[in-house]
Amino acid sequence: MKPTPPGECRQCYPHAYDKKIHARLKPGEDCKPCLDHKDNGHGDNIVPKTSKWW
Ligand SMILES: [Zn+2]
Ligand SMILES: [Zn+2]
């Protein structure tokens, strides 16, 4: 799986691009983590854009 690029949410990005994650949900069932982020925002899960820490 691809690493989450800067500026993207560590949770929502794989959920959006890896169909397997939502494949476990029943049709019409909401993904709890996705709902949570939709309602409350992504918080600390956004990958920082600064890539050079060293
Ligand atoms: Zn999801
Ligand atoms: Zn998110």
Image (spheres, grey):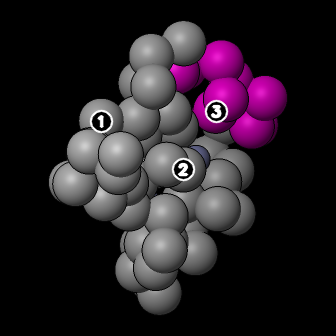
The amino acid marked with disc number 3 is His
| Residue 41 percent coordinates (x, y) | 40, 80
Relative horizontal placement of residue 14, taking residue 13 as reference (left or right): right
Q: Is mark 3 within 8 Å of ligand 1?
A: yes
| Image depth: mark 2 or mark 1 in front | 1
Dot 1: within a 10 Å radius of its alpha carbon, few (fewer than 14), some, or many (20 or more) residues?
few
Residue at 31 percent of width and 59 percent of height: 48
Distance from label 2 to label 1 (Cα)? 12 Å
Dots 2 and 1: beta carbons under 8 Å?
no
Mark before the other along the chain sequence, 1 or 3: 1
The magenta-colored residue range is 18-26
Mark before the other along the chain sequence, 2 or 1: 1
Within the image, what quadrant is residue 21 found in? top right
Residue at 65 percent of width and 18 percent of height: 20
Mark before the other along the chain sequence, 3 or 2: 2
Magenta-drawn stretch contains 25: yes
Magenta-drawn stretch contains 19: yes
Q: Is mark 2 within 8 Å of ligand 2?
A: yes
Relative horizontal placement of residue 29, taking residue 35 as reference (left or right): right
Q: Which residue is mark 1?
A: 5
Q: Is mark 1 within 8 Å of ligand 2?
A: no
Is 7 rendered above or below residue 15? Answer: below
Residue at 69 percent of width and 63 percent of height: 32
